[in-house]
Amino acid sequence: MDIQDVVQKAQEEQLRLVRFLYCDNGGIIRGKATHASRLASRMKEGIGQTFAMQAFSGVEQLAPVEGLGPIGEYRLIPDPDTFVVLPYAPKSGTMFCDMRQTDGSAWGACPRTFLKRMCAELAREGMRAEAAIEHEFYLARRENGAFVPADNSLCYSSIGLDQQAEVIDAILGALESEGIEIELFHTELGPAQQELSVRHADVLRAADNVCLVRETVRGVAYQHGLYATFAPKPFLDQAGNGAHIHFSLWSNDSGNSTNLLYDPGERGGLSQLGKYFIGGILYHIRALIALTCASPNSYRRLLPHYWSSAYGVYGFDNREAAIRVPSLFNGREAASCNLELKCSDHSGNPYLALGGLIAAGLDGIRRKIDPGEPQEIDPGNYSDAERERLGIQRFPTTLEEALNELEQDEVLTEALGPLLSSAYLAVKRNEVAYFKEKTPEEEALQHFYKY
Ligand code: GLU
Ligand code: MG
């Protein structure tokens, strides 16, 4: 797609508004919309936005970040390849944007540009990345100010599929019309908890897709009188919502790209390069998690025995490990070889999460970091003494702790760059301070309809 294609399509569809969206440091999807009559010039010039928005937190407060105050602005420049007509909002379309300086050059506080930079680093090493996300969310109604699950379905229950059949069909139809390739759908453990898997794609497109899926699921559910929430722990006594990341690395030779994680001679088909990549992720996991599990609410989800992972280990088909190495599918072993990061949820910014994952994994490859032995049991079943002997690390148990780890992690902060890392830390610390004064119930309620 180029600008002309987008303008033509917008005319054919008689669009009135086209949204220029982005995901901010607080993990919130925001944006402004242009009237369709101004689309062509807006796509070239961008829409102006104050610098301060990259210091704006998820609780609508301006965090103190040098240079990101009321003075100065950047431009939201949309990527025409992300253009879709929105099936849930009349005469509306949307695109996802880069943040650029007024002279058109890259801006250091832009998360999407950060992910592009990490892709370029991979390309310099002859690699490219693909990712697919498992989207878990609840469907709820609002009753007397509280959110209540839309049904009482059991895990994988077909009754749940029947009860929500209409809204599920509308959600999937909307996603199809937007060009999202759907792989699987099922009811999850919690009442009215759903899971939607989307086909893997180039990592930048995968991050754009995360935003589009979140927008579309929420938008279509709302049309059906329901609230869809991707918050990590919207109901404190129920299963959390993960956003597990399936990740693979490919050689970037055009035409004949091979899966670099795969080696048929190794256990589970996992190549030495794949082990180093895991080594890097586990080495940085306590800091990386500040990007992949990015809200105070995230840390209520990451408990032992909840299948969300709580320890920095990997294992073959081990669903309590931070990284599961999934078993391969017969007949398409090379194509199906991937890694699944469990400690990830939708309160994060997908561009930051995937970019951080690449930075950590690349460090593992460059420094040949050994991930140690795979874990064959639930690491939560070891005693503290055994975990210590085996060198098994518990994740940070609060966002505050994770942010302190991130601040100390030179690989990740250097990859993010000074402006983005300081803005991110300030925004997230603002959220930490805000929720310190609140009860868990208030926290869950306030996270409910943000992501
Ligand atoms: N809901 C779990 C989580 O918080 C994941 C359950 C599963 O898919 O295994 O990550
Ligand atoms: Mg699941």
Image (cartoon, grey):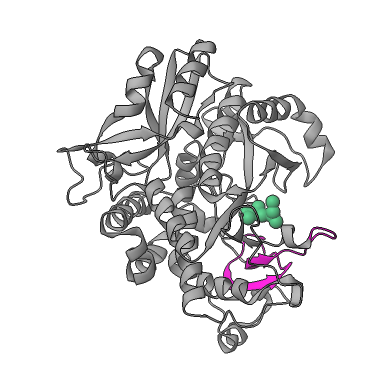
Is residue 111 part of the magenta span, yes or no? no
Residue at x 68% of width, y 76% of height? 381
Whether 185 is drawn above or below 95: the answer is below
| Circle count | 0
For the residue pair 190 and 207, the one nearer the viewer reads as 207
Principal secondary structure, stretch drawn in magenta: loop
Whether 416 is drawn above or below 234: the answer is below
Q: Residue 34: x and y, percent? A: 36, 20
Is residue 314 part of the magenta span, yes or no? yes
Whether 431 is drawn above or below 418: the answer is above
- In the drawing, does residue 193 fall left or right of residue 431? right
**Ligand 1, what quadrant?**
bottom right
Whether 82 is drawn above or below 15: the answer is below
Q: Quadrant of residue 291?
A: bottom left
Residue at x 45% of width, y 40% of height? 446
Q: Residue 444: x and y, percent? A: 50, 45
Q: Residue 1: x and y, percent? A: 50, 30
Q: Mark yes or no: residue 368 visible.
A: yes
Residue at x 73% of width, y 58% of height? 336
Q: Residue 326: x and y, percent? A: 72, 63
Which contiguous range is marked in magenta? 305-332
Q: Quadrant of residue 51?
A: top left
Q: Mark yes or no: residue 283 visible.
A: no
Residue at x 68% of width, y 77% of height? 375
